[in-house]
Image: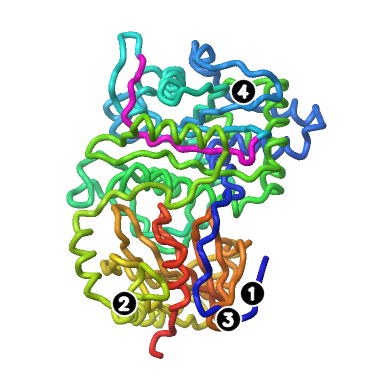
Amino acid sequence: MAVYGAPAPSPAPEKPPRPGRGLIWRYLLAGALIVACSAGATATAALLQVKQVADIFDRNSVPLPQGTSTALDDVASGKPQTILVLGSDRRYIDIKQKNPSRSDTIILLRLDPGRGATAIMSIPRDLKAEIPTKNGLVTDKINAAYALGGPGLTVKTVKALLGIKINHVVNMNFSGFRDAVDRLKCVYVDVDRRYYNDNNPPNGSATDYATINIKPGYQKLCGAKALDYVRYRHFDTDLVRAARQQDFLRQAKDQVGVSKLLSDRDELLKIFARSTQTDIRGTDAILRLLKLGYESAQNPVQEVHFRSDIGQEYVTASPQQVQDTVREFLQGKASSGARGTPKPRADDAARRKKTNRRKSSTTYPGTFDNATMAEDQAIQVAVGLSKIRRAGGVLQVYYPKLAAAGSNYVNDQVSPRSYLIEDRGGHRYKAYRLVVSAQGLGQYYGVEGTNWKAPPILDNPSESHRIRGRRLDYFYDGDRLRLISWRTKGGVYWISNTLLQTLTNKQMIGIAQSLSLVGT
């Protein structure tokens, strides 16, 4: 960790692109294949251990549908491999009407020790694609391939779309996800806003979506609630939803150490096996994959963003966008910028016009002075915290005087929020959340404060900087600042970027350094 002692008169420059370390575990945890990989990484040389893993999996798992393996491409031992991970979507209305499931998650993982990075890529589930059915090509969302022909047809569709070979497939349902989260004693998640649906307009249309009521702020989510959170799919976009899933899995990976996975390996493997179908079976197949994964582990991992545009019905990608995406995926090169192109909000134009009348910051481009509105919210949470009697200690309230251009603070029934949070030992702490709506559908950044001084989210910062006498911890995702935190004697505070990380580094730094104590 580098600490710069002298105060900096200007913000730190934008970081050069660099692969995000540890991103691979986001997806491997989603399909508990991570358990086998984590166990095998320390026991590759011990054939007995690998055999035990293979036996547990083979006894509890269900084979892939007949014919799926014929869609896969053979690969020589030790050569690069591409793995397709599928998560099936089974909503309440599908069960009631006996509708076939569509793939909820489509992820590609590229293991290639010869490249500078291990590549992971999410394919938008609403991507417009030509699906090669037995009766000819069908134009539909790419996740419809799963309903029309299961994992085998999905493999063929992805191969035809991208023009690449796929060597293995892992097909999961989300019951395993829910059970694994419970087995791992839940996950602390930095929830960006309120997620709510009661299947009654305007909060949702009747029975179309699962009911959900998760308030904003850092909190512990367990099985069913965690599953509702990652599957939430309205009032945002396909890209935002994928980013939310990735963010959840990143936080889960950061909180679940290898020792926990190893100590509970057998039970986690059983959970994974019962909810997973894959061609990766038997000691030899698992050993080959573990060896390749071990050789690739020395490389950083890069999340490849699928270049696309969001339309009314489909996510679309031009041939050039597909070509550029595939090139980056196969070459393992870093990409910069946000996770995707945010879909404009209906009120974005009016918000920009209103913002332009406000005083802009020249030191931190893309921010403006919004101290009055922020302090009003800070006073609300301060009053709310003063009424909480069930947790000891005092939590001072800080708010940022700067805000991102085009943003507005959310003020509804639950935002801003004053609340209690428990650590894993059952100790309670005060906390508050300010929710800020940014430009783009489903884009929210947040200000969090708590007198829990060791929340898992603040473990292992990328680096630290001292700006105007204040030490700020930076947390990067690739070249983009995902989070900036600040500590006092009485608490910790942080600024969270949007799920698509649409705030620039300078915006994040400016907002963080402008944190001010309420009433001063």
Q: Amino acid at mark 1?
A: Tyr
Q: Is residue 56 above or below residue 298?
A: above
Extent of the magenta region:
115-132
Q: Quick check: 488 left or right of 229?
A: right
Which mark is in front, 2 or 1?
1
> Separation of disc 2 and disc 3 at Cα?
24 Å
Tag 1 and tag 3, C-beta contact below 8 Å:
no
Residue under the point 19% across and 59% down: 347
Percent position of residue 348, x then y: 23, 59
Q: Amino acid at mark 2?
A: Asn
Depth order, front residue of 130/287: 130
Q: Is residue 413 above or below residue 204?
A: below
Colour mapping used in the image:
rainbow
Q: Amino acid at mark 3?
A: Pro
User: Residue 123 in magenta?
Assistant: yes
- Tell me the residue that label 4 is attached to: 280
Q: Quick check: 478 left or right of 228?
A: right
